[in-house]
Amino acid sequence: MGRDPSDDRRLMLGLTPFLTLVTIAVIVGVILFQWTRRTRPPRDVEVSLVADPADYVGSCPTIFRFHGTIRVKGGGRVTYRFQRSDHPTTPIKEVDVGSGSVARVETEWHLGRQSETPFEGWQTLELLTPQPLTSEPATFRMTCVP
């Protein structure tokens, strides 16, 4: 006794919507996986900043230099800026960090004689992308003498 060909046709018609949905789900899954691999922030990011000098006594005006490091596990391009205790921020900058290495960044703050003496201030290194993170403040103290 043979099979009725119309049974095969009904089975295929019933499976077609299911197979279409499975195919779409697989395609969407692959696209999402690839997209998150490209946009996922790294797991390990570190930033640090130090003031040089940290304690200054001398003639004014003077310059404080701030030396920062950015470490990104796996490397990549980062955007960052510096924030000062008197509230200005520097323009946003970019730097490429090699895998397993550190990017060194710097900024300066030119200060003249201050009404408050000694003058105490700070600056932070603010990582914007790929993952927001702010360093501990790099503090400094300035005492102007004639």
Image (cartoon, grey):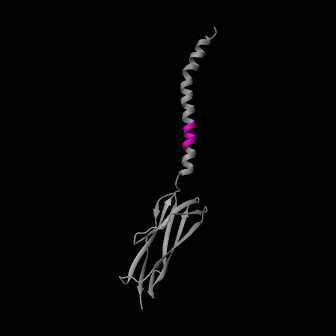
Residue at point 55% right, 39% down?
29
Q: Quadrant of residue 142?
A: bottom left
- Residue furthest left in the image: 116
Compared to residue 46, the image places residue 107 above or below, namely below
Compared to residue 20, the image places residue 104 above or below, namely below
Q: Quadrant of the N terminus?
A: top right
77 and 115: which is toward the camera: 115
Residue at point 57% right, 67% down?
103
Give how far across and how far down residue 117 sits, in percent.
36, 84
Is 29 magenta? The answer is yes
- Residue furthest bottom in the image: 146
Give how far across and how far down residue 38 sits, in percent.
57, 50
Give how far across and how far down residue 17 sits, in percent.
54, 25
Q: Quadrant of the C terminus?
A: bottom left
Residue at point 55% right, 38% down?
28
Give how far across and how far down residue 48 sits, in percent.
49, 69
Q: Quadrant of residue 134?
A: bottom left
Compared to residue 126, the image places residue 22 above or below, namely above
Is 136 magenta? The answer is no
- Magenta stretch? 27-32
88 and 104: which is toward the camera: 88
- Residue furthest right in the image: 2
User: As drawn, is 118 to the left or to the right of 27?
Assistant: left
